Amino acid sequence: MSTASGYLTVAGLGVDVTYKEIKNLHISVHPPMGRVRVAAPRRMDEDTVRRAIAQRLPWIRKQRAQLQSAKRQTKRAMLSGESHYVWGQRYRLDVSRTSGNHRVEPVGTTLWVVASEGATAEERFGVLDRWYRRELKAAIPPLLEKWQPLLGVKVSRFVVRRMKTKWGTCVPASATIWLNPELAKKNPRCLEYLVVHELVHLHERTHNERFIELMEAHLPDWRARRDELNEAPLAAEEWGDAATP
């Protein structure tokens, strides 16, 4: 059976489309993050596929919301013994050390979060969250230095901001990319994929055929990296947020 693949964006929703020698169009929503896949008859044109997806948007969004809610990590109490991740590695949290010099130290398999004596869970989370943001902000410039000349683009700035359902986004009009601080918990391969993904959007705003061609030309294993990232659970709803350039 011959097949062809593509990628569409419908009402802001990214959809993987596979064209096959079949009679009817099928839409499915897959765990863990609610990736939408469509199997369409090879003879069907793109506009017809888009209309079919648009008609099923309420159902698709409901399915995605259920999957993302189920996959979200349980809320952390910031107590010793919890599991936390740093660049894809699992650590056991230890908050037994106290000091006015707040800091985070990954040592061996232990993630030390040092805060003031009597600090609340929210305050300890603040120490850890700020550290994750610093980690991510330090990791992004080398990737930009590597990939901007290769792709022939340049961002005006990047912003680190917590997002509920997105790992990153691009604002082509201002040449700005936004990245979720949760990426500091994932394998560095995932961060590189996100940076390349958002930089490619400076060439092509939608996930169309040209976007896919650019991704495959510059990062041939991008689909594997994307799937690796999307297999990782999102963090639970945390305390507060702030955009940091």
Image (cartoon, grey):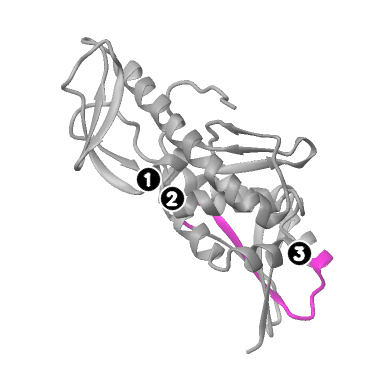
Q: Amino acid at mark 1?
A: Trp
| Residue nearer the viewer, 43 or 82 | 82
Give residue 24's quadrant in the image: bottom right
Identify which residue, 41 or 55, lies in the foreground.
41
Q: Amino acid at mark 3?
A: Arg
Q: Earlier in the sequence, mark 2 or mark 3?
A: 2
**Magenta span has 43?**
yes
Q: Mark 2 or mark 1, which has the lower sequence index?
A: 1
Q: Quadrant of the C terminus?
A: top right
For numbered disc 1, what is the local secondary structure? loop
Magenta stretch in the rendered image: 31-48
Determine which of the numbered discs, if any, sits on residue 87 in the image. 1
Identified at 65% across, 62% down, the residue is: 215
Any mark on residue 25, and which?
none
Callout 2 touching callout 1 (CB < 8 Å): yes
Up/down of 23 relative to 157, above or below: below
Of circles 2 and 3, the one toward us is: 2
Q: Position of residue 132 (x, y in %)?
A: 41, 32
In the image, residue 29 lies in the stretch drawn in magenta: no
x and y percentages locating residue 59 in the rendered image: 63, 52
Q: Amino acid at mark 2?
A: Pro
In percent of width and height, residue 25 lies at 69, 72
Say which residue label 3 marks.
210
Q: CA distance from mark 3 to mark 1?
A: 31 Å
Label 2 crowd bin: few (<14), some (14–19), many (20+), radius 10 Å: some
Q: Which residue is mark 2?
A: 188
At a point 71% along the width and 44% down the height, the residue shown is 154
Circle nearer the N terminus (3, 1) = 1
